[in-house]
């Protein structure tokens, strides 16, 4: 039986170059290198990290909303954190707990 895996970091394996996200099938008798994960495990981790990222973005947006700070809904986490850091320098800044 074969094991489907996903490359989690750019690497060489079996004389081939694999980029992150590339698929490779290993035989049962082959040792799976540490830079490959079983496909099901990898998909679960990616889904969980995406959900966590969306949650963090929603929290940052809520904090900016509380302080009536304009932002673009397309902004990612880094840009939202930057806008929040600038806003925190203002004396009128309210944290989520104060609101």
Image (cartoon, rainbow, N blue to C red):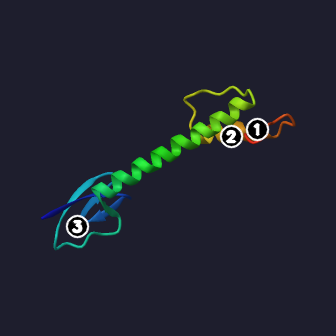
Q: Residue at x 25, y 54 (%)?
A: 23
> Which badge, 2 or 3, is on the more N-terminal residue?
3
Measure how far apart labels 2 and 1 are at the Cα level.
6 Å
* SS at badge 3: loop
For marks 2 and 3, give the CA distance: 43 Å
Q: Residue at x 61, y 42 (%)?
A: 78
Up/down of 76 relative to 72, above or below: below
Report the residue marked by disc 2. Answer: 82
Residue in the foreground of this view, choosing between 77 and 49? 49
Residue contact between numbered discs 2 and 1, judged by CB atoms under 8 Å: yes
- Where is residue 6 shown, x and y percent of the image? 29, 56
In this rendering, position of residue 12 left or right of residue 47: left
Q: Quadrant of the N terminus?
A: bottom left
- Residue bearing the label numbered 3: 14
Mark nearest the camera among 1 and 3 is 1
User: Which residue lies under the disc numbered 1?
Assistant: 86
Residue 20 is at least partly visible in this image: no
Q: Quadrant of residue 2?
A: bottom left
Q: Secondary structure at mark 2?
A: helix
Q: How many numbered discs sit on the rendered protein? A: 3
* Left or right of 95 in this view: 91: right
* Residue 29: image location, x then y, percent: 16, 74
């Amino acid at each position: 039986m074969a094991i489907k895996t996903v490359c989690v970091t750019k690497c060489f394996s079996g004389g081939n170059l694999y980029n992150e996200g590339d698929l490779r099938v290993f035989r049962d008798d082959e040792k799976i290198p540490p830079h490959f994960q079983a496909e099901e495990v990898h998909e679960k981790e990616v889904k969980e990290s995406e959900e966590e990222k969306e949650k963090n973005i929603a929290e940052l947006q809520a904090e900016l909303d509380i302080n009536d700070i304009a932002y673009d809904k397309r902004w990612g986490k880094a840009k939202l954190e930057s806008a929040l850091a600038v806003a925190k320098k203002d004396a009128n800044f309210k944290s989520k707990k104060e609101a």
